[in-house]
Amino acid sequence: MADDKTEKVKRLMYEPEKIRNIAIAAHIDHGKTTFSDNLLFGAGMMSEDLAGKARVLDFHADETERGITIDSASVSMVHSLEGNEYLINLIDTPGHVDFGGDVTRAMRAVDGCVVLVCASEGIMPQTETVLRQALRERVKPVLFINKVDRLIKEVKLTPEEMQKRFIDIIAKVNNLISEIAEPEFAERFQVSVQEGSVAFGSAYHKWALSVPYMQRKGISFKDIIDAYNSGEESYKGLSKKAPLTEVVLNMSIRHHPNPITAQGYRIPKIWHGEKDSKIGQDLIKCNSNGEPVFVCTKIVVDKNAGEIATGRLFSGTLRSGDPVYMNLAKKKLNLQQVSIYKGAQRIQVDKVGAGNIVGLVGLKGAFAGETVSGQPIEPFESIKHIFEPVVTKSIEAKRPSDLPKLVEVLRQVGKEYADIKIEINEETGENLMSGMGELHLEVIENRIKTEKGLDVVTGPPIVVYRETVTKKSDELEVRTPNGHNIFFFSIEPLENEVYESIGKGDIPEMRMKKKHEDVWAKLSELGISNDEAREYREVYKGNVFEDATRGLALLSEVLDSVLDGWRLVVDGGPLSKEPLTKTKFILHDAKLHVDHMHRGPAQIYPAVRKGVHETMKKAGAAILEPIQTHLVEAPIEFMGKITSLIASKRGVLDDVQQEVGTIRIHAQLPVSEMIGWSNDLRSSTEGRGISSLVNQNFKKLPSELQEDVIRRIRQRKGLSENQ
């Protein structure tokens, strides 16, 4: 970044009405990184020859080798429109579903996204997923239909046929927005050709068009087709007539909100503190003079600077040396550096104001989702990815002498890759790494070897299961170990509607220490009575704790210990120490000793643990297995082989559609049967079949498999038969 550009960025950082925070999101191979390259070229940050080939924002070696984006990357650039300069903070996100957690976290930092759709392939499963991720955070989409050159050169469509193809893609995107967005945003976030929130073009050939641009410049689709039919020199000239950067960034400035506008409607969704308080108003108004509040969305480890927390500054101003408080880690620290990004490069600045995407050095121990402020405040809602890690591998150092380094590296990996779950058991020496799929774990393993310089070996893939209950238990009496306190508990399956709303993020996962009118209203819509809604005390990992007691004076003094004890059991249930899901645990009554010495955590935790274990025995405890819904596409002649392959993996066909020469199959497959799925599909279809993840959920493992799976998990974890 040349000095004058850096100076422009520094100046515009303090004018939030001229800032646009945007992400580029799409299905894999729809052209996001080439598209981002061209935006950088247009902003004068790379040469024209390299744009679309250099993949500047893919700065890890394995991203270049595999030809896919694995990590999100941030960059700040300046763009002029109608005589005014604007600061664009852009995040390029991964398209492969295994790295979708980076998309989820990027959406917390931005206010708008450019959704890319390949003109030839159309809407794909990951297109729907990225839209869902954006709309859940109230991030406004615009649409770019990419690879239009393929329709002209390969498919040879007429202008009328192209127009029909575009109308179909736009209609499908708007239908998805209507289905996914909250009612108040379903209409507001629609994309429109006439208004200019839809553009078409070729990122590879560096041109783009929108209807307002075509009207202003007098260009038609016929001109584009004629240019391609006239030879390479002619269509290469399109990048001068209709430069992609100008069309797309103009569209973003006009149709994406600035941070002041966006935070007015985003903050009430993602922050559950008092909106009328001083800090609440600072956040809603994006007040640079208010209390500083920063949300970390990614940790990057720099060899020289150490841990850098990247994220969004929602209010206030941060300077090097400022004292700050990490609300989840409950730690006070001083900032060492404040910086902005240009891909892999970091540019230090003296201070930064609200509404920007920044990197902070000095937040030791921070992680993605941490809320950093001047004083303790209500943290922001946790950043929850749509899909959970379902594949685990054990990992150990090749040389025993490297064990201390392995533990250190794994802790670092857990911070850098927030959707990789690391479990370190220093007693047994077993270290586990859980991710979204085989590719996800393979990439992290490779980076530990190449970037961290540690030789490791991993075990075979292990599937992550869940525990639940199938019916309502009776109310059971449980005593603390000293016999001085008695609790009355029951457990039952959580209502489907509530469970799904928690999964969508409509009901936040948090401990409820005060009135939450918005949560109560949502529960009421789902058919939960007002009285019961007010009894919710915590939502955690798809489970609910309900306090149905009446007028117990001493309960408030032990309730936090009860909830902490319950969370420990949710993390590892009685059947096989797998996490609980879709349960409602109810405290009906309690008899508590008047002396607090007799009701400390050492007494409460074992009682709650026993309570969950005993009630689950009575409520038909069962194992749930992860199920993935995949869309399989292949030439029609392979239909028989594909259906046989799905059947051999305990799969279930949901839907089969035939198009000209092609078959599209939606199938549900147990993750435990999907190890090696990609290779099996390639073998069955002579390399011509592709599979995309559409959805993921947990379903009850068939009864005949329950006992064997529980035994194998317990054996692997070293649990005794009756523990």
Image (cartoon, rainbow, N blue to C red):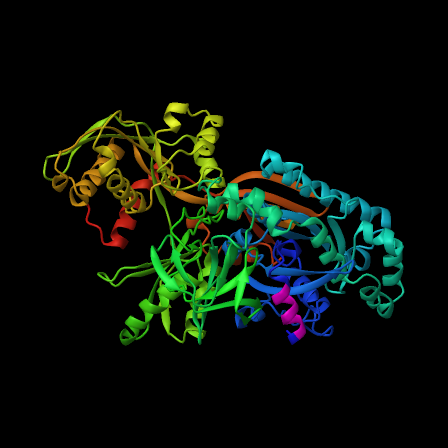
Q: Is residue 231 left or right of residue 354?
A: right
The magenta stretch spans residue 721: no
Across and down, in percent, residue 337 comes to 47, 69
The magenta stretch spans residue 9: yes
Residue shown at the point (29%, 50%) measured from the top left: 712
Split into 4 quadrants, where in the image is the C terminus?
top left
Region rendered in magenta: 4-11
Tally the marks. 0
Q: Quarter-wise, where is residue 556 in the image? A: top left
Across and down, in percent, residue 229 comes to 88, 62
Residue shown at the point (25%, 43%) measured from the top left: 565
534, above or below 396, in the image = above
Which secondary structure type mostly characterizes the magenta part of the structure?
helix
Task: Identify which residue, 545 or 166, lies in the foreground.
Answer: 545
Q: Is residue 600 left or right of residue 652?
A: left
Split into 4 quadrants, where in the image is the N terminus?
bottom right
Across and down, in percent, residue 422 comes to 36, 59
Q: Is residue 118 left or right of residue 125?
A: right
Task: Identify which residue, 201 or 246, lies in the foreground.
Answer: 246
